[in-house]
Image (spheres, rainbow, N blue to C red):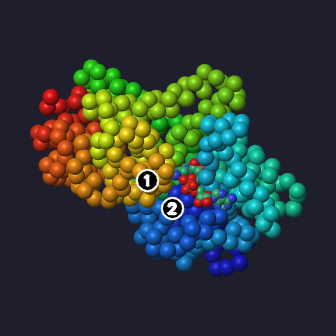
Amino acid sequence: MTTNNFKKNILCIGAGYVGGPTMTIIANKCPDYKITVVDISKERIDAWNSDQLPIFEPGLKERVLKVRGKNLFFSTDIDAAIDQADIIFVSVNTPTKNFGEGAGKAVDLQYIEQTARRIKENSRSNKIVVEKSTLPVRAAETLETILHSGKNGVHFEILSNPEFMAEGSGVRDMEFPDRVLIGSKDTPSGLAARKELVDVYLHWVPEENLITTNLWSSELSKLVSNAFLAQRISSINSIAAICEVTEADVTEVSKAVGRDSRIGAKFLNAGPGFGGSCFRKDILNLVYLCEYYQLNEIASFWEQVVTLNDYQMERYVKRILQVMFNTLVGKKLAVFGFAFKPDTGDTRDAPAIYICKRLLEEKACLRITDPHALKNARKDLEGIDSEVEYIEDPYKAAEGVHGIALITEWTEYSKLDYQKIFDKMEKPAFIFDGRNHLDHKALFDIGFNVYSVGKAPLTHF
Ligand SMILES: NC(=O)c1ccc[n+]([C@@H]2O[C@H](COP(=O)([O-])OP(=O)(O)OC[C@H]3O[C@@H](n4cnc5c(N)ncnc54)[C@H](O)[C@@H]3O)[C@@H](O)[C@H]2O)c1
C-alpha cells in the first residue's frame, strides 16, 4: 500500500534484538524502501529514537544514525503502520512456555497470535507476512488460519525467513550472511511473495547465498541450526570433564579434532555452558515437537544437550567450592563478565545467572563487573543481591577478593594487569577461567592458583 516515494513499505513488528538490527541493515542497504519498526513497548521505541539505543551491538549505532528519520522509523502506532505496509516482518518474542500444557518446553505463542490478530484487524490491502521469529514447524499454518479467518477479502501470503545472526556479531552477520533462508508455498502467490523478499535481499546478498525452500523446511532449519550449534558446545564440554581427570588438555584436543575438515574448528571451545535467549529455548522446542510426534528417542537425544549444559554450569560452581576449601561463606569473589557472550549486553539465559545464584546460595559475596551488562545483571539478580556489588571497573571489583570467576571472555579481560590485581587480592589467590581466555602460565607465575576448563590446574600448593 505504498502512497509515498518509496518502492515498498516494510514493517517489522517487534523492536528487539532481532527486529531493531535487521531492519537497520535493510534500511541501510535498501534506500528505496521505507522501513518502520513498531513495538508495544513505548520504552523500547523511545530508546530506539534516542541516543541510548536499547541494545548494544558493535557497529549498530552508526548504522541507525545514518538512516533514522530518512527511511527508518521507530513507532508505537502499530495499527496505522500495519495498514500502510506491503511486507510485514513478525519479530516478536517466542519464549518457552512456563505454564500449562508443554510448560518448560513448548513455545509460548501468545505474542505471535496477538500479532496475527492485530494484522488481520488493521489490514485493508493484501500483505506478505514474514515469520522472522523462531517458530515451531508448521506455525505458518496457524498464522494463515488466523489471518484468513473472518474473510475480509484481504489475502495474506506467509513466508518463513528465520534469522541466523549471532548477538555480538549481529551487524556483520547480517551484512555478510552465510545464507539467507526463505521458505514459501509452491503456489503462484507463494512464489510471487518469495520473489518480493528475494528482491529485498538482492540489494546486498549474493544470489548464491539465498536459499529457498518450502515453508516447513525453513521453519525446521532454524531449530536444527541452533540444536547443532548447542550440541557442539555440549560435546566439547563433555570432553572437558574427561580432560580434567586425565590431564589431557581440551584446547589441544579441540585443535586436533577441529583440523579434520569434516568436523571443522568452530564452536569447539569449552566453557561454563551455553547461554543466550535461543539455544535452550529452540532445542526444547525441538524436543517438544519430537514428543508431540511420538519420536521419543529423538526427543531424549536432543534433551541430553540441555541436560549436559546444566551439568557443566553446576560443575563449574562445584569446582570453585571444592577448590576454595569447601566453603564460600563470607568469601569475596569477583565475577568477570555477566553477558552470555562478549560484545553484547544481553544476559538472557546467561550461565552467569545460574552460577551467581549458586555462589550466593553458598553465601559468597559477589563483585560483578561487565562492560555492558550490569544493568541487566541487576535485574536478573533482583531480590537476591544483598551480597552483590555491581562494579564497572574490574580492578576495583577484584580488590580484596579471594577469587576471580571469569565467565564472559570480553577482550578487555585478557589485557588487564594481573600483577596489579594479584597484589590487592586475599591469599591464596584463585582464578577460575571459565573460558580459557587468559594466559594461565603467566597468571601462575604471578602467584595465582589457576583453574581453567578442561585442563589440569596450575597451583602453588
Ligand atoms: N536474539 C537473538 O539472537 C535471536 C537470533 C535469531 C532469532 N531470534 C528469534 O527472534 C525472535 C525475537 O527475538 P528477540 O531476541 O528480538 O526478542 P526481544 O524480546 O528482544 O524482542 C521482541 C519484541 O517484541 C515485542 N512484542 C511482543 N509482542 C508484541 C506485539 N503483540 N506487538 C508488538 N510488539 C510486540 C516486545 O515488546 C519486544 O520488544 C524470537 O523468536 C527469537 O527466538 C533471536
Task: Specify the quadrant of the image occupied by residue 89.
Answer: bottom right
Between residues 238 and 209, which one lies in front from this camera angle? 238
The answer to whether any part of residue 408 appears in the image is yes
The residue drawn where x is 69% and y is 68% is 78
Q: Residues within 10 Å of mark 2 (few under 14, many from 20)?
A: many
Query: Residue 240 appears at what percent x and percent y?
Result: 34, 28
Q: Is residue 34 left or right of residue 82?
A: left
Horizontal relation, residue 20 to residue 267: left or right:
right
Height in image: 97 above or below 61?
above
Q: Secondary structure at mark 2?
A: helix
Q: Nearer the viewer, mark 2 or mark 1?
A: 1
Q: Position of residue 137 (x, y in %)?
A: 67, 40
Q: Residue at x 51, y 27 (%)?
A: 304
Give neighbour class at mark 1: few <14, some 14-19, many 20+ (Cα, 10 Å). Answer: many
Determine whether, in the image, residue 358 is placed left or right of residue 325: right
Residue 29 is at least partly visible in this image: no
Residue 154 lies in what quarter of the image?
A: bottom right
Task: Find residue 226 and report its horizontal and vertical position in percent.
Answer: 52, 40
Give whichever of 100, 83 is nearer the camera: 100
Whole-percent x, y for residue 292 in the image: 70, 30
Q: Are circles 2 and 1 on residues that touch, CB within 8 Å?
A: no
Give the secondary structure at mark 1: helix
Q: Which mark is residue 377?
A: 1
What's the residue type where badge 2 is placed?
Pro
Q: Ligand 1 quadrant?
A: bottom right
Kind of residue indicated by mark 1: Ala
| Tag 2 residue | 21
Q: Quadrant of residue 253?
A: top left
Q: Residue visible at 77% across and 57% down?
A: 117
* Total marks in image: 2
Q: Can you say which quadrant of the picture contains the C terminus?
A: top left
